[in-house]
Amino acid sequence: SAVISQKPSRDICQRGTSLTIQCQVDSQVTMMFWYRQQPGQSLTLIATANQGSEATYESGFVIDKFPISRPNLTFSTLTVSNMSPEDSSIYLCSVAPRQDTEAFFGQGTRLTVV
Amino acid sequence: GQQLNQSPQSMFIQEGEDVSMNCTSSSIFNTWLWYKQEPGEGPVLLIALYKAGELTSNGRLTAQFGITRKDSFLNISASIPSDVGIYFCAGLLNGNKLVFGAGTILRVKS
């Protein structure tokens, strides 16, 4: 399985500010994804990070709020923009090394907005 | 959207007991995955199931992919304290996207 490193592991941010989360993988992967896990909840897919093109967002998530970059096959960033307390969640990077197979997760970024 | 119904929501069991949890869906999945999440960590893959009817083991864990492709169960035999965590089922959609169950919180009394 791929080794996935996320930074930061946690942060406390002021409302109205933005935070960029980085995801670095130790090998080239075709597919990278960003998930959100709200407190006490399950995981929900935010978007698929596409290498060299705009991310594909799921219903309920928009690019202005969650801009995503993927400059190459080993790195992606997710920005949480203009944060409010409702954005307090764990944000998780995920990769799938091959089509139609299992996905692996980073350790997550625990975000608290005050 | 597609939803997975995972049960039970939580379990508090005695060390040494066996555990069973399951997921059902109104939709067909071609792949079922089971993950475990511990506090402060991301989900860790336990078992992946690719064929209907498939029964797969990983140590004390056994999972089955239902014949209808709409359900899966996970069993843990002879539970130990380090089994504590949240267990999630997930169905794999086109494009490698995952839809998750609500999770089963497992607590073990030693």
Image (cartoon, coloured by chain):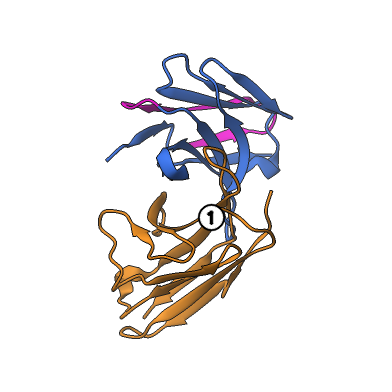
Chain colours: A orange, B blue
Residue A29: x %, y % from top left:
60, 55
Please identify the quadrant where the C terminus of chain A is shown.
Answer: bottom left
The quarter of the picture where residue A19 lies is bottom left
- A15 relative position to A95: left or right: left
Chain letter of the residue carrying label 1: A
Between A34 and B5, the one lying in front of the other is A34
Mark 1 residue element: strand
- A3 relative position to B88: left or right: right
The quarter of the picture where residue B80 lies is top right
For label 1, the crowd category at 10 Å Cα-Cα, with few meaning under 14, some 14 to 19 and many 20 or more, is many
Magenta stretch holds residue B19: yes
The quarter of the picture where residue B69 lies is top left
Between A71 and A63, the one lying in front of the other is A71
Q: Is residue B101 visible?
A: no
Write the start and end of the magenta stretch as one range: B10-28
Q: Is residue B20 above or below residue A13?
A: above
Q: Is residue B36 visible?
A: yes
Magenta stretch holds residue A13: no
Residue A79: x %, y % from top left:
41, 74
- A113 relative position to B59: left or right: left
Q: Is residue B70 above or below residue B92?
A: above
Q: Is residue A78 above or below residue A48?
A: below
- B80 relative position to A97: left or right: right
Seen as rendered, the residue at the extreme front is A52
Q: Which residue is mark 1?
A: A94
Name which residue lies at 28% across and 73% down. Answer: A64
Residue A14: x %, y % from top left:
37, 85
Name which residue lies at 32% across and 83% down. Answer: A15
